[in-house]
Amino acid sequence: MRTLVVAVLLAAPFPALAADDGVIWAEYQPECFIVRAPQYEFRFSPDFSFIDYLMAKSGQGDENVFDFYVLPSVRVDDRDYFSVAARRSAEVHPVWIGRYLTQIQIQNVTLASAQGDTWPGLAEMALYCHRDRVYVRVSLLTGNSSIIANDMVVYDAAEGHRECPAQAMDYAGAEFHLPGTSAKIWSGYAIAGEHTFPKEWWHYDTPFSAVSVACEEAALGVVFPERGRPGRLVARRQRGTPPGLKLLAPVTGADMGGVPVTWQPGERHEVFFELIPTTAERLVPDTEAALRNDLQPLTADHFTVTRGEFVGYDPTRGTYRFNAQDAHSPTPVKGYYGGCRFTVSNDDRPRTILIEQFNNWGGLRGAVIRDGEGNPLPIQPQISVNFPERAAEGEHDWGYVIYPLELKPNETRTIWADHLYYGYGVHDQICLFSLENVGDHPLLQTSVAIMESHTVTTGEPELRFNDFRRYKSDYHGYRSVSAVLPSFLRYLDPEGEWHRVTAGPISVQHVGPNLVEYVIRGWTDDSKVELTLHVWQAAHDDMTRVFYRADIVVKEDIEVKQGSHGNLRLLNHHTFNPMYYRKYAFLGADGEVHTGELDLSGTAKEDGTPLPATGTWVAEYYAPNILDYGSMSPEGVFTRMEKDAPGGKWHTCGDIVGNPAFLLRRFDARINGRQIDQPGLYVFAARGGDNPDPGQQYARDLAIVLPELPTRIEAGSTISYEAMSFVYGTLDSGYETAAAEFEQWSAAALQGDFPLRVKAKNGQAEFAVTGGANWMPVMIDGFEKPPVLALRYRRPGSADWQLANLGREGNDWCTLYRDGEGYGALALVPTHQWPGATYRIEMTGTVER
């Protein structure tokens, strides 16, 4: 049975991330749940009851499969109970997902015996996934409540597994099953011995702090960060199987000496350990280095804190923990900086430490890492934020800022790690983070200041911008805004089945505060079409603008049902109940603006209408709502059939405002060997009150399609387009804003890509900006060292260069990033303040790193 599972998992259609993609991602698949990191990946069993099948990445492009598994287990009255034997599936919960640290919580793990009876308690597994290692916490609970709360999440206990009586435990802990032919065992730093498995049973019983195991394919180190905790190693040799190692790690409150320990109801018992996937050549030094880091961390006397509080090193998750100074308010002063500021002095050996700053308020919306003079460092922070659904049961909102610090021997560094709430310097800021506690599939969310911008679904039913929203700049008393769901590819086959894109790996380039950038790869559910979606969004304070490029490759021939161009949609803007848009407009191939009415007829209003090859805009608008017209006015309600709504009245839109639109900046397709440069438009208005799906009674779809719909699209066909989605205005707005945005942000207007990129020469870059509006992000590459920069501008017709004083607290108008072997800068240029100006970026010095 295990062999069958392996075959299914390894045949999964999603390839692994490249080692330099720099993100630790959690991914749902139909057969399992996968965590991918730059140097490893591992998979959970299909029922999430145990960790299975680690893959160590050697860096040479190959993956070494290390077939091991870890599962909770107990022994009561000489009967063994294992999670692998339970029939009930556990629940997986990604608490946070990020570049440096991904936390996965496995909840409601039940344990059963080979005879079929079930232990009345529950187990949990928490995994803190670093880029090169995994810290694991296994917990066994004898809870007496239907609600169980751990340090991050609250959940319902599995029925029948919450009333655990007092019982004598023979053994309780985590059980490892590891392949291999040899093992080295550490207690502290003393090597207890190297053991090669003989043909007969072999037994070793001693307190230990680490063990490393090697086999022909890969190697694994297991470190226990608490010195001297008892452990037991048992070799196993079964007929027809290779030799291996069985490791029992007891939880607190469990005895390994054969004397049962009585547990009472309502207790929690835990064990912590660290998994180090590596190669056989690096096994011993990597394991010993990990043990040294855990047993000899930097202590409190190495840190001098001027903002926030140093908590200490946590060996159970591998982080140095701080409590940050925060705003404690849903309405912080604009430009308020919280976070931590400290000086750290290293000891006599080099180390990279992972900082974890806790923000006791879920309103955290960004962070920036700078040196002691306010200059940005080339360190991208990870921001993780919780929006609790279970607040009634005691779950709190929180925010974390996580980032690494490289320390040379005896080096002293001063760090300003500021938390951003509403504004960065004199301008706004943007943030990208994983969105927690919102459902079964991980989400990403971007926010401008403290307002939601857009979220991105990364699981079923399809890859899309979820709840794309308009940013409203008046901070106090803002109203909710319209929701629109842009998706990027779907097609209907001749049997009437829709095929949509599900997301695979993600690579995050920039998390803010000036620019968000990420790339998602996805595949249709039949694995025949591949999508690469590259997304950018800047910190604009007048409007939410999301730029993206979609590259579509047909891997296998697909067949498309005929009858409507909408059966193959390359970009689809979908709005739904309660937004009831009445009008739409677009720029046609003839260069004229075309308008139309959106009714409730359930018919297509445009079906392949030609659009310009040079780019276009499409908008829908005019959705009357209750606040604008009153709940009983004809404009504020929609008359439905008496059987569907008592009184025949149905309120639409509530207080929601805003009009969705998109710009098509470029389009290029090669279908079945034929070049296509001109796209088509599809507009569909759902039928009214008799729609069996209440959520779709006012649905509208505005989609980019092919001008001619082929019955078959052959493998090798490609489609590429660049677009910008935005939501604008109020009920009184027409299509003019969409037309104006096209004049500012089309490819012709910008005369280049978004964001703009320039190359520095001798520490200087000079450029002019055409098109665009608001703060324009400009990426400057080519610095050999991390630069300290100044921005100057020259107005049209003037020969004088003026210094642009954009900072409020230090040099806070730009951020730095690593650019291959060098460094780059991301600057926000206020093109709306000096239209037509020429700009000069000057390097005036260097920062520490």
Image (cartoon, grey):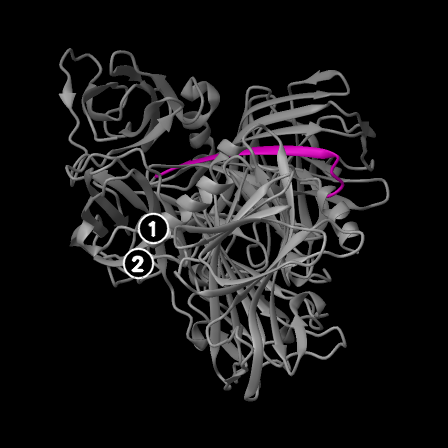
Viewer-proximal residue, 205 or 114? 205
Helix, strand or loop for disc 2: strand
Q: Is residue 382 magenta?
A: no
> What range is drawn magenta here?
525-539
* Residue occupied by mark 1: 401
Give the image quarter of residue 520: top right
Relative vertical location of residue 439 with respect to residue 571 in this rendering, above or below: below
Q: Which mark is residue 359?
A: 2
Left or right, 107 with respect to 559, comes to left
Mark 2, other Cα within 10 Å: few <14 / some 14–19 / many ≥20:
many
Relative vertical location of residue 838 with respect to residue 456 in this rendering, above or below: above
Viewer-proximal residue, 713 or 577? 713
Q: Is residue 236 visible?
A: yes
Q: Quadrant of the C terminus?
A: top left
Identified by mark 1, the residue type is: Val
Q: Residue at x 60, y 40 (%)?
A: 218
